[in-house]
Amino acid sequence: MRFIVFVKANADTEAGVMPTEKDMAEMMSFNEKLVAAGLMRDGEGMHPTSAGARVRFNGAERTAEKGPFPLNNTVAGFWMLEAGSLDEVIEWMKQCPNPTGQTGELEIRQLFDPADFGEALTPELIAREQKMREQVGG
């Protein structure tokens, strides 16, 4: 099963406060453990929302808005993991160094597997998706 773990943003991450060398070393050690255990597929920190944008949909209408955005439910980073269960990911994330050094939160979400879509994901669509994955190296 594949999971994404979101590091929730806080006032410091949104202000562009960078981690210390000690923080970076602790997170690097944790990431190395995830890699050695065969779980980690990807992971990155993200610039504040002031450097981002959102595109909103309303029927056929599209509008874009540049950041910054309110702190509620903003993301400062992520891990892409592959594990046997949600409980396994929870146990690993409980060992994570505090990503922000303050009160914080990680959100863990399972990614859909092609089988989850049932008959809506036809063999033709599966082939098209596989071709795209090959093109992007995934």
Image: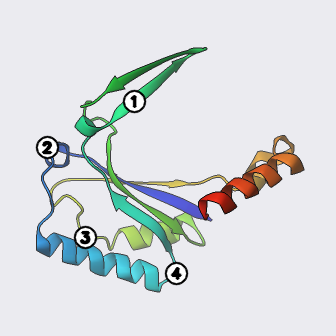
Foreground disc of the pair 2, 4: 2
Quarter of the image where the C terminus is located: bottom right
The amino acid sitting under disc 1 is: Arg
Tell me if residue 95 comes above or below residue 19 in the rendering.
below
Label 4: how many Cα within 10 Å (few below 14, some 14–19, many 20+):
few
Where residue 3 sits: x, y (%)? 53, 60
- In primary-sequence order, the first of circles 2 and 3 is 2
Within-10-Å neighbours for mark 1: few <14, some 14–19, many 20+: few
Residue 123, horizontal then vertical, whole percent: 88, 51
Quadrant location of the N terminus? bottom right
Which one is closest to the eye, mark 4 or mark 1? 1
- Residue type of the residue flagged with mark 2: Ala
Return the residue at label 3: 97
From the viewer's perspective, is residue 41 above or below residue 37? above
Residue tagged 1: 54
Residue 122: x and y in percent read 86, 46
Separation of marks 2 and 4 at Cα, in angstroms = 34 Å
Which disc, if any, is residue 38? 4
